[in-house]
Amino acid sequence: MSVRIKSTGISRSDDTYSIVEHTARAARQSLERAGIRSDQVGLLINAGIFRDSNTVEPAVSALIQKAAGIGLEYAKDDPRTFSFDLMNGAVSVVNAIQVATSVLETGSAEHVLIVSGDTHPSMTRSVADDEFPYSTCGAALLLERTDEPDGFGTVHTVKGEGTPAVEGYLDISTMGNRGRSLITVEREPGFEDRLLQVALDAARRALAESDHASLSEIALIASTPSPEFPKKLAAALGIDQRSVRLPDLRDGDPHTAALTAAYDSAIVDDGLAEYRQVLFVAAGAGPAAAAVLYRLPVFAGAPA
């Protein structure tokens, strides 16, 4: 048994800057694409970091679950959907895949829905800039168990040494009465090189389990702290630049939504038909990285 991607969902628009609404829309789209009911989702994991109005409580996963209409039945024998936030910067989605795999392997859930995405807490913008380098994008990744040979392999994680490289925080000494609409993101000098170092380490560990597949048969989907980061990673790994699949970067880095958005785009554009596997690599604050190989189903070229 393994765990594979059943469908994906993406939400981008300027009619709202709420990441709760965007991730809820992406969640509903993924269920519609998969043709499953909301009561078939046993677990929802929110992997987003920057949220509406710097919400701390309740868990944002619960707000997304409510907005998506998942698990809202309360009769005695109605199915239950559990949800929680999993926060580890840009690495959160791969960490969530690891948790989801463990849950699905126990048979305690039929499907697990991983949602991700970030927004400026002021909810007045969707385009990245130097002060807040992340674009607003909601993403959903619906996972299921399968007895087929496709699916995710082992998740490999790496923690770098030294300072965090990237930090996001609320400066309580200067926020005044505007704390719910402010956030500070700092990227240390050379942060991208440090992220690349841990990403390489994690990626090489994952590639060691590639079942002797040629690098020409592996597509790369990676975090996008810069538009060039995935291609720099590909060059260091010996993967052809043409095998890199990117999310829509016109508004900047989708951050926690980047991996799902890139996979969604590749599936919709039939951009994975010539590949046997996808190498997912995430790197971010810590510095930390995680990587996992995904064996593509035979129908991977069809829209998810």
Image (cartoon, grey):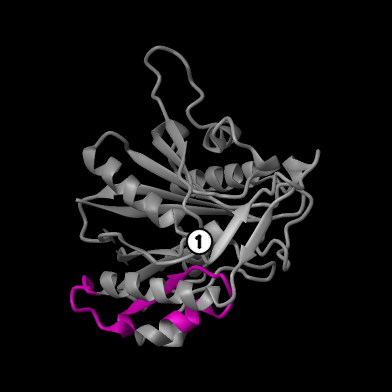
Inspect the image, locate mark 1, and give the three-letter code of the amino acid beneath it. Answer: Ala
Q: Where is residue 269 in the image (x, y as percent from the top left)?
A: 51, 71
Residue receiving disc 1: 285
Q: Where is residue 284 in the image (x, y as percent from the top left)?
A: 49, 64
Magenta-drawn segment: 208-233
Residue 104 sits above or below residue 9 on the image: above
- Asked whether residue 272 is in view, the answer is no
Q: Where is residue 199 in the image (x, y as percent from the top left)?
A: 40, 72
- Mark 1 Cα-neighbour bin, 10 Å: few <14, some 14–19, many ≥20: many
- Asked whether residue 151 is in view, the answer is yes
249 vs 212, left or right, is right
- Work out which residue is located at the far front of the displayed protein and give it: 173
Question: Which residue: 53% across, 57% down?
Answer: 256
Q: Position of residue 218 (x, y in %)?
A: 33, 77
* Mark 1 secondary-structure assignment: loop
Q: Is residue 19 magenta?
A: no
Q: Quadrant of residue 196?
A: bottom left
